[in-house]
């Protein structure tokens, strides 16, 4: 066994190697890099925590301010109830007295509802509203459709004279909403009148103190309005769902919800489907916002674009201020491209060969007018100049006008020209068995097989007048196209004389010897 060295004994120091030095250096470098990485990670965590803390602090401040604003609004609403009720009661009392005076006055009413100007129209509307004659009011309004702008201006003032405007409006439109009681003999669509009256009711029932945030409709009337909405929804199911309902009916229903303030949050998806299905209606963007669909507008706009309704999408973007996200000019150009493709598909449709050109032109014209109107409405002339669109529209309208010009049809009886030239033969005279007859109607003829060999139209040529009578033979099913025939000269019929046999020669089945020049 070897002896164990004494710890205190001095031994010879080993010389450190270069490899060990490199190993130690590499270890120190790795530790330094790891320390730096950990420090950066900790600093990043600290910064994220500070940002989240600041975000939470701002959210708490916003929540506090919103809570304070909500409490102040509730307090204001609570304090304003008494004043609003007093104003409403005084209005009801005033309207009641005015109605009693109207009933007591011996004033001759105009049974036909004919008025000379806006003042007379307003007076008649006020009279029906004061007396709460809803049916007469309804009949008067639907009879004045041509004066709809004047009605929109005067109806709110007239409805303010009602003792109970909400009840009056529901009774007035009850004939056609929620269910059309006229049945199959309903006639014209009267949804426009329903929408007009419901829109006119809004400024009448808003709270005079705090505005549109509170609708002054009695609880009983609000419950009745909810029942009407449910009835309409049930009738919608009976009519086959959203896809089969008319857009004016949808507009009336949504306006009914907004007017009476009976929008349900649980039905927002249902409202969204109705709005998208009737998005082409001009008032739909505003109604969508009033229904509480503002947060869903981006998705609705994308859905409209995917369906090829770029023009409707433009109206929605301007309503909610999403023009930066959905630029209007590319949408309008895409709409025009789709319209041109649709017009081309109409031209290629073999089922519409007769009216294909007319339908295609009408499709493109409608698209051009809509885009031009949109450009003018939203002041997009700088980004999308409409001059080329207007030129194209004028070109299509000019083509349509030219096609409508009457075609000059030649008279049945042939007359000689002014200079006494020879009388041209009738086209039908080329039939195989055409002949002059004194009977009222020509006998049936047999098609000659030689006619199928004529490859080109034959111009007019002289023929012995004695072989023709004053009446024309039956129409030739193989009549030559007038477009290919050369134009006749005034006073004479050009062309070299031809070996045209007498009509008696047709009976042998021989074809007339036409010159080769007429086939070129």
Image (tube, rainbow, N blue to C red):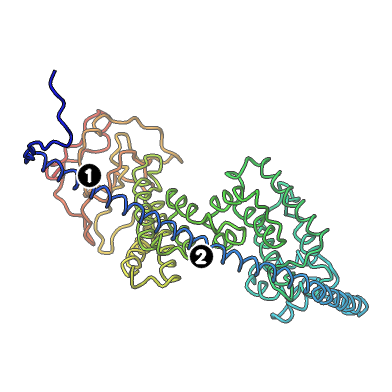
In front: 57, or 34? 34
Numbered mark located on residue 319 in the image: 2
The residue labelled by disc 1 is 457
Residue placed at 56% from the left, 59% from the top? Answer: 284
Seen in the image, is 519 located left or right of residue 54? left
Farthest-out residue, right: 104
Residue 218 found in image quarter: bottom right
- Counting from the top left corner in percent of width and height, residue 265 is at 65, 52
Q: Earlier in the sequence, mark 2 or mark 1?
A: 2
Numbered mark located on residue 42 in the image: none
Of the residues tagged 2 and 1, which is closer to the observer?
A: 2
Seen in the image, is 394 located left or right of residue 60? left
- Counting from the top left corner in percent of width and height, residue 97 is at 90, 78
What is the crowding at mark 1: few (fewer than 14 residues within 10 Å), some, or many (at least 20)?
Answer: some
Mark 2–mark 1 Cα distance, whole angstroms, equals 63 Å
- Counting from the top left corner in percent of width and height, residue 293 is at 57, 56
Provide the secondary structure element on which disc 1 rests: loop
In front: 413, or 318? 318
Seen in the image, is 104 located left or right of residue 204? right
Provide the secondary structure element on which disc 2 rests: helix
In front: 445, or 58? 58
What is the crowding at mark 2: few (fewer than 14 residues within 10 Å), some, or many (at least 20)?
Answer: some
Residue 24 found in image quarter: top left
Residue placed at 60% from the left, 60% from the top? Answer: 287
Farthest-out residue, top: 1
Is residue 163 shown above or below 296?
below
Is residue 149 shown above or below 450?
below
Image quarter of the C terminus: top left
Residue 374 found in image quarter: bottom left
């Amino acid at each position: 066994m070897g002896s164990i060295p004494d710890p205190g004994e001095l031994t010879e120091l080993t010389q450190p190697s270069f490899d060990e030095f490199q190993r130690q250096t590499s270890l120190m470098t790795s530790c330094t890099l790891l320390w730096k990485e950990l420090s950066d990670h900790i600093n990043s965590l600290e910064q994220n925590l500070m940002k989240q803390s600041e975000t939470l602090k701002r959210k708490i401040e916003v929540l506090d301010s919103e809570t304070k604003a909500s409490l102040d609004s509730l307090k204001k609403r609570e304090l304003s109830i008494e004043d609003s009720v007093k104003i409403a009661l005084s209005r009801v009392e005033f309207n009641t007295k005015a109605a009693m005076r109207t009933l007591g006055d011996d004033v001759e009413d105009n049974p036909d509802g004919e008025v000379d100007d806006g003042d007379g129209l307003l007076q008649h509307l006020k009279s029906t509203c004061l007396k709460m004659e809803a049916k007469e009011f309804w009949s008067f309004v639907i009879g004045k459709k041509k004066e709809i702008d004047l009605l929109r201006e005067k109806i709110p003032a007239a409805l303010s004279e009602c003792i109970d405007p909400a009840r009056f409006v529901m009774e007035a439109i009850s004939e056609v909403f929620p269910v059309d009681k006229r049945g199959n003999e309903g006639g014209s669509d009267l949804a426009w009148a329903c929408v007009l009256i419901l829109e006119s009711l809004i400024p009448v029932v808003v709270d005079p103190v705090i505005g549109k945030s509170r609708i002054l409709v009695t609880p009983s009337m609000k419950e009745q309005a909810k029942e009407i909405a449910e009835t309409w929804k049930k009738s919608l199911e009976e009519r086959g769902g959203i896809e089969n309902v008319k857009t004016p009916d949808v507009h009336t229903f949504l306006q009914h919800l907004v007017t009476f303030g009976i929008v349900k949050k649980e039905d927002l998806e249902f409202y969204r489907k109705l709005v998208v299905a009737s998005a082409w209606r001009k008032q739909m963007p505003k109604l969508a916002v009033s229904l509480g669909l503002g947060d869903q507008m981006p998705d609705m706009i994308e859905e409209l674009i995917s369906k090829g309704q770029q023009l409707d999408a433009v109206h929605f973007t301007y309503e909610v201020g999403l023009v930066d996200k959905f630029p209007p000019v590319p949408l309008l150009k895409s709409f025009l491209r789709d319209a041109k493709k649709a017009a081309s598909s109409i031209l290629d449709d073999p089922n519409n060969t007769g009216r294909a050109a007319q339908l295609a032109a009408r499709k493109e014209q409608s698209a051009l007018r809509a885009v031009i109107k949109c450009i003018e409405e939203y002041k997009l002339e700088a980004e999308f100049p409409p001059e080329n669109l207007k030129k194209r529209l004028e070109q299509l309208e000019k083509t349509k006008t030219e096609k409508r010009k009457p075609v000059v049809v030649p008279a049945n009886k042939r007359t000689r020209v002014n200079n006494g030239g020879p009388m041209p033969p009738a086209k039908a005279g080329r039939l195989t068995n055409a002949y002059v007859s004194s009977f009222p109607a020509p006998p049936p003829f047999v098609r000659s097989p030689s006619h199928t060999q004529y490859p080109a139209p034959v111009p007019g040529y002289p023929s012995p007048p004695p072989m023709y009578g004053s009446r024309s033979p039956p129409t030739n099913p193989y009549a030559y196209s007038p477009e290919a025939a050369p134009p006749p000269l005034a006073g004479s019929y050009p062309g070299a004389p031809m070996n045209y046999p007498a009509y008696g020669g047709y009976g042998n089945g021989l074809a007339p010897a036409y010159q080769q020049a007429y086939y070129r």
